[in-house]
Every structure is written in structure tokens, then in C-alpha cells.
Image (cartoon, rainbow, N blue to C red):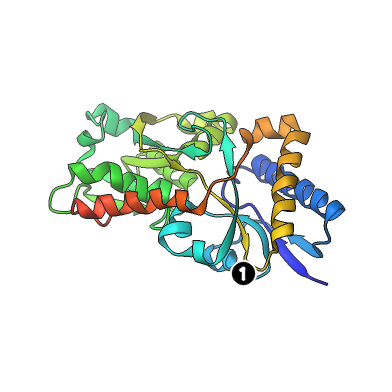
């Protein structure tokens, strides 16, 4: 019997959201199983540490990645693109999204009310392979950088939620947070935004794609796409909790925009966030 694994690791911002994503995934796979023999599937929690090995697994039936590893780090050559979620959150337009530019209240009070005014401050960033936290912020900063530098330092936080905490506590001054994560966190924990001010948004980009192993057949791929649509439509309250409007079918070439954003920063002499 074929054995698969599946997980949706990218927007598990609270236990409530993690449970809702797991429920959506379980229902989707149940619908697929009724119409197509997909074998044995294990639904996993979000893997700890590096996600790239998880995304590259031959037995990956469904997961979600970021556009930066998908396009810039070459994952697109190793996986199938299944769908792209459409979210109902400020900064989203169809299957596209932005990052919220936010500053600590301390930085705001010192005059950091625009990105240009954040020169020489400490930036918080979730990870070096994140489009929303790093690549989008680097692109926004590139025209303002001097001799390849803009910030005094960069604090690598490990997650968008940790970036928000760093800003709220004053451990960092400015950061970029995925607008979907920003909205989901605000829905569940508005108190975490005390001590944080927003100053704008980054450029629009294609949203975080759902992917699968290339071992998945064409018929199975289409069945999975149809099942995601059906599972979304079946539970309006779950969709509301996840701010999920549905799923789009983007072409892989669409994600070249994220590589173009990276290249634009490099061409302006700002290849690294610093």
C-alpha cells in the first residue's frame, strides 16, 4: 500500500488555528479517499526546525511552503504546485498578499513613522528564507540603503509571532509580518499588539503555495484540488476562523515575481538584509 504524509505548517499561529487547518486537511483527504485510492495517509503536526527536508519528501501528499524556497531556492523543480489559498485579510488581493511593516511603540515615539525613518534601527526578521519576513522587507529597504546597509542590526526571531513579540517588547524596532499571520494573530490575541504600530505594507506577491511530491499522479492531483474546494465549502465557520476564501490555481511561473523582487534588491546593491 502507498503511504503518504501531509501537513499544513505555515499558518498554525495558535492551537485553535492549528486544529482548524488539521480539520480542513483531514476532511480534504477523506473526500479524496472516497473518490480515489490514495493509500495510507498520516497527518503530521508542523515539523520542528528546517522545513526544506519535509517539503522534499517523496511521500509528501500535501503541505504548504513559502514562495521564496519554492521559486528562489529551487523547490519548484522538485514538487507539484497544487493550489494557492485566497485569504480575507487586509493586504490580500485574491491569491496575493503583502507584509505589514510594523515598528515598536518606542521606535514610533522616536519618530520611526516611515520606513525611511527606520534607518539605523534594529530589524526583526523571522528567517533568511522567508519572502514575507526577509525578501519583501529587503525589497522595500533597497532604494533607501547606503553602501549595502540600512539597519544597525538584524534580530533573527524564528517566526512571525516571535517578530511581533520582539517589537512589542522593544527588543527590536521594525519588522515585516505576513499580513495573513498578522490578521490571524490579531483575531486571537489582540493584546499582543500593544506596543506595536503599523507604518505601511510591502509590495504584493503570490501567496504561499500548497505543494505535493511529484510522485503524485495527475488524476490524484486533480482529485486533491477538488477535495480542497469541497472541504472549504463544507464548513463556513472553519473558513471564517482561518480567514480562508478558497483556493486559486496559479501557474508555477507566477512565482517568478518573488525571484524578481529578490533580484531587484540585489541590483540596487542590497543583496542581504542588513
In the image, is 99 to the left or to the right of 187? left
In the depicted structure, whether residue 105 falls above or below residue 134? above
Residue nearest the viewer, comparing 177 with 123 = 177
Residue nearest the viewer, comparing 32 with 129 = 32
In the depicted structure, whether residue 73 falls above or below residue 197? below
* Pointer 1 local density, CA inside 10 Å: few below 14, some 14–19, many at least 20: some
Residue at figure coordinates x 62%, y 66% from the top left: 214
In the image, is 214 to the left or to the right of 37? left
- According to the picture, the residue beneath numbered tag 1 turns out to be 57
For label 1, the SS is loop
Residue 160 at what x, y percent from top left? 46, 45
The quadrant holding residue 100 is top left
Is residue 120 visible in the rendered image? The answer is no
In the image, is 250 to the left or to the right of 175? right
| Image mark count | 1
In the depicted structure, whether residue 187 falls above or below residue 76? above
The quadrant holding residue 230 is top right
Residue 195 at what x, y percent from top left? 39, 31
In the image, is 121 to the left or to the right of 189? left
Determine the residue located farthest toward the right in the rendered image. Answer: 34
Determine the residue located farthest toward the left in the rendered image. Answer: 147
In the depicted structure, whether residue 43 falls above or below residue 124? below
Residue 250 at what x, y percent from top left? 54, 46
Residue 270 at what x, y percent from top left? 22, 53
Q: Quadrant of the N terminus?
A: bottom right
Is residue 99 visible in the rendered image? The answer is yes
Residue at figure coordinates x 35%, y 44% from the top left: 171
Residue at figure coordinates x 25%, y 31% from the top left: 112
Amino acid at each position: 500500500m502507498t503511504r503518504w504524509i501531509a501537513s499544513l505548517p505555515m499558518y498554525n499561529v495558535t492551537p485553535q488555528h492549528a486544529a482548524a487547518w488539521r480539520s480542513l486537511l483531514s476532511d480534504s483527504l477523506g473526500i479524496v479517499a472516497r473518490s480515489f485510492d490514495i493509500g495510507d495517509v498520516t497527518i503530521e503536526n508542523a515539523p520542528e526546525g528546517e522545513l526544506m527536508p519535509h517539503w522534499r519528501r517523496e511521500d509528501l501528499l500535501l503541505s504548504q511552503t513559502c514562495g521564496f524556497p519554492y521559486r528562489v531556492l529551487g523547490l519548484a523543480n522538485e514538487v507539484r504546485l497544487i493550489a494557492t489559498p485566497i485569504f480575507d485579510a487586509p493586504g490580500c488581493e485574491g491569491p496575493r498578499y503583502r507584509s505589514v511593516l510594523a515598528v515598536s511603540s518606542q521606535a514610533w515615539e522616536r519618530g520611526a513613522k516611515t520606513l525611511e525613518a527606520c534607518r539605523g534601527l534594529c530589524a526583526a526578521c523571522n528567517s533568511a528564507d522567508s519572502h514575507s519576513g526577509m525578501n519583501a522587507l529587503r525589497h522595500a529597504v533597497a532604494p533607501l540603503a547606503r553602501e549595502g546597509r540600512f539597519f544597525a542590526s538584524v534580530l533573527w526571531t524564528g517566526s512571525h509571532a516571535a517578530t511581533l513579540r520582539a517589537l512589542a517588547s522593544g527588543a527590536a524596532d521594525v519588522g515585516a509580518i505576513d499580513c495573513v499571520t498578522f490578521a490571524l494573530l490579531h483575531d486571537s490575541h489582540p493584546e499582543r499588539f500593544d506596543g506595536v504600530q503599523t507604518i505601511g505594507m510591502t509590495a504584493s506577491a503570490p501567496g504561499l503555495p500548497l505543494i505535493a511530491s511529484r510522485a503524485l499522479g495527475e488524476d490524484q492531483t486533480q482529485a486533491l484540488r477538488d477535495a480542497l474546494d469541497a472541504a472549504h465549502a463544507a464548513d463556513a465557520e472553519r473558513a471564517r476562523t482561518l480567514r480562508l476564501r478558497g483556493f486559486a490555481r496559479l501557474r508555477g511561473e507566477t512565482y517568478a515575481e518573488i525571484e524578481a523582487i529578490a533580484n531587484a534588491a540585489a541590483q540596487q546593491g542590497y543583496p542581504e538584509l542588513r
